[in-house]
Amino acid sequence: MKSKKKIARFYRSFLKVAIHRFLLVKTIILSILCFLLIYDVHATNVNKRTLPNGFVVLHSETHNLPIIMVTLLIKVSPLNEPLEKAGLANLTAELLTEGTKNRTSGAISEELEFIGASLDVTVFSDYTAISLSVLKKDVHKGFELFSDILLNSVFPKDEIERKKELIKGILKHREEDPAFLAERAFKKEIFGDHPYGRPIEGSIDTLGSIKRDDLIKFYSSYFLPNNSILSIAGDLTEEELNSLIERYLKNWEKVDLPPFNINRVGNDNKIRKTMQIDKELTQANIILGHLGVSRDNPDYYAISVMNYILGGGGLSSRLMKKIRDEEGLTYDVSSTFISNKEKGFFQVEVQTKNETANSVISEILNQINNIRQNLVSEEELSEAKSYLTGSFIRRLDTNREIADFFAFVEFHNLGLDYVDKYLTYINSVTREDILRVAQKYLDPENYILVVVADKKKASIKY
Amino acid sequence: MKKRRIFFVFIFLLLHTVVYSSEVKEFILENGLKIIIIEEHKAPVATFQVWYRTGSRDEPIGKSGLSHLLEHMMFKGTQKYGPSEFSKIIQKNGGIDNAYTTKDHTVYFELLPSDRILLPVELETDRMQNLIIDNRETLLERDVVMEERRLRYEDDPQNSLFEEVVAVSFKAHPYQRPVIGWMSDLKSIGRDDLYNYYKSHYSPDNAFIIVDGDVRTDEIIEKIKNYFGRVSPSGIKKKNTNFSEPEQKCERRVILKREAELPYILIAYHTPNFPHDDSFALDVLSLILAGGKSSRLYKSIVYEKQIALDIDAEYDGLNIDPFLFFVDATAAPGKEINDVEKTIFSEIENIKKIPPSEQEVQKAKNQIESSFIMEQDSIYMEAMKYGIFEMLGDWRLINRYLEGIRNVTPEDIKRVANRYLREDNRTVGILIPIKKVRSEY
């Protein structure tokens, strides 16, 4: 009863009881897009232009279904908020749909839901995304609401209080989830006071310190056309799009952005630390990892291939083969390099019954050592490459994915010819490159280990 | 070689403006295997899906979780393709494969660049009939499934309550059992249980295939004929196909006390399944109650009273047999779960007395129709939709579903609320957190 994603209403109950053989990709834009993906045929189909107010518009026209998917990526995130007001970016985003000059919170949801549309605002580590999904026949209504929350939000006092209480409650509820506890502790340790080191929502304390003025200032400083990328995919011609922008976003004015203070990523000096959180659980939830690379690191592609072989390749990865297939010790084990704008991290995540936690940790370290000491086989390399390149065509098969993808490509300046470049980058990776990046970016000595478990039963030796 | 006859039907869907696939083609092979092909050329991708008409509903007593464990074993190899080789071949070709099990059925699917879509035909045919089910592999995979059970249920307080409420809601029907199986049952499942179940339930006459995407029907059907066409039907008529559940006569309550952060309530009412005449109104009712921030329960409990963090209502009606209508909510910190419960019941009483407005009903209908269209953006979701309706009898029931939804009136909502959302027809589950003092870090 937990996942409340609206997209697949029809199957919600159905999917909840459907037990999959293997965990499906976590549906966060970032986690999917970090990896790879491109579109072969349709990618070339995108138009880009920059309006006089600095607003970048990307348009991908498809006419197979009467739907329109809009992604507005705004370059604002916890990177722009002060530590003592952690959660400011998220609270601002959450309140956009809670009252404008023209509509109350109730009116916004009533009008949206009446046309079966959705308008979600989500904050990620590096940016904020406003996603509108609307039927073609209701596109004017959809854009009217979209522009209203974007341009005219008023942050009513009672809505602020209501939202703060709700977020505090959600933060408390999340503590029930051992995976959340592990992730929170892990990020805090590797990133310290850097915004990447805390939950997007902030904490109960910092939320209390956010005032209405903070929200208004944050909103007017960053929610600007010259700080945003609009990406649209769906049943809309260029002419129609132009008239929508003219009609609903004409009054969005360019304003100079406040200076950006780069946050120093803490703890660059290597450390080795184990943290344990004791809970009444049957399984130990384990995260082992350390700092990683930023998205613009030239080794990003070699790392992608290396990580696919180590633990990113689902059931084909070494970690999965060893720990799940050969030993039956887990349902899911994976390794990931999350690459943010400023810095990323590497982590292996796994759950196993308390009693086998030590052997699983030992095997993870074995596998990390192994890939740092020996060349991967030709076969492993070619399988990884063919998956990473071959899956391009398959990954972006919906308008929603296309809209999100181009916004992401633009945000990271990957270029609209990223399709071709990506294939070249992946195909040029050699076994020696993999050994090199494994030695450079994996560290089996200095790592952070977080174990959320029944401490006595797990009796961690690391 | 014997020539194989094929029956086929062409159907062109012209369903108002809601179903957009241009055409659906249906074939039935001599061995009873049905194939449904939806050609959709919007992107160079395709999905191949084999649906077996068997799920936890069909398991013998004491062996809950058998269908799901077998689903895992389907990746453990045949004489021709060793363990995990299936997935390896698919991934090497840029695809992914996965499978899932529900109460009623088990589905195996691949998503591939469309120029490789013929690839799974041979592989799926092979594992329909030649699975090994090695004893050692079985024991290992059983451990994997036990870890999966710990992850999804044992260590998740709300999901644990869900399991308890469903088990208590049914006295007789196999829907009382969780798809993943009880831990105690899982321990008793052996290699032979799996093999016998496999041999009696996996056959062309107990399955159907769905292909959706950028494919050429003539090409793929030829290949399917050549492979699947050679598999013999099992001829076994499934036993125990009719289950019924005695009418519930009184409210049942489950109180679960365990380590958790916040109280949680889950209410389940027995309801008929699709395409019962009342199923459409029940679907609309679930949205009027909790379909978004403008719904009745959200406005009252989460927004105005602020006593819960979330609220959901859902009618789970796309099953072979009647199942349940759920309402659930997590209490806000410091709030009483009893107040949440009272407010839910008082909102339900309101709708039993006064029918909802035309506007509310229309809004719910629009939400259903819009999500119906948007889901077609993904060929995987689209294929799944056809599969679900086919499993319930015929994929053409999609039309019936949409038509049924369009015909719902405010009076229907009031009527079904009175008929099903009754005290003596419900099971109420409450999670009460117990905080244990433990050391941190």
Image: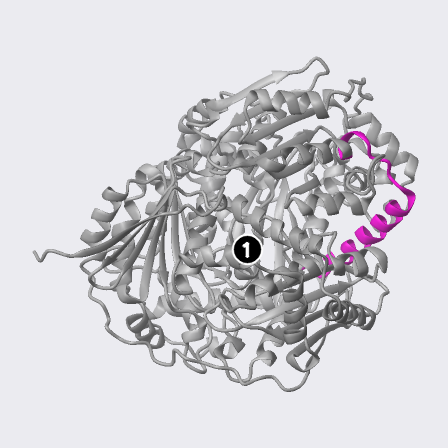
Overall secondary structure of the magenta section = helix
Q: Is residue A434 left or right of residue A134?
A: left
Number of labelled discs?
1
- Quadrant of the image containing the C terminus of chain B: bottom right
Note whether A176 is above or below A416 in the view shown: below
- Subunit under mark 1: A
Q: Position of residue B360 (x, y in %)?
A: 70, 55
Horizontal side, residue B342 vs residue A41: left or right: right
Q: Is residue B152 magenta?
A: no
Tell me if residue B331 can be seen: yes
Q: Specify whether residue A281 is in view.
A: no
Vertical arrangement, residue B331 with respect to residue A32, above or below:
below
- Segment tinted magenta in the rendering: A149-177
Q: Residue at x 90, y 47 (%)?
A: A158
Residue located beneath label 1 in the image: A10
Q: Residue at x 59, y 36 (%)?
A: A137
Residue B188, horizontal then vertical, whole percent:
44, 79
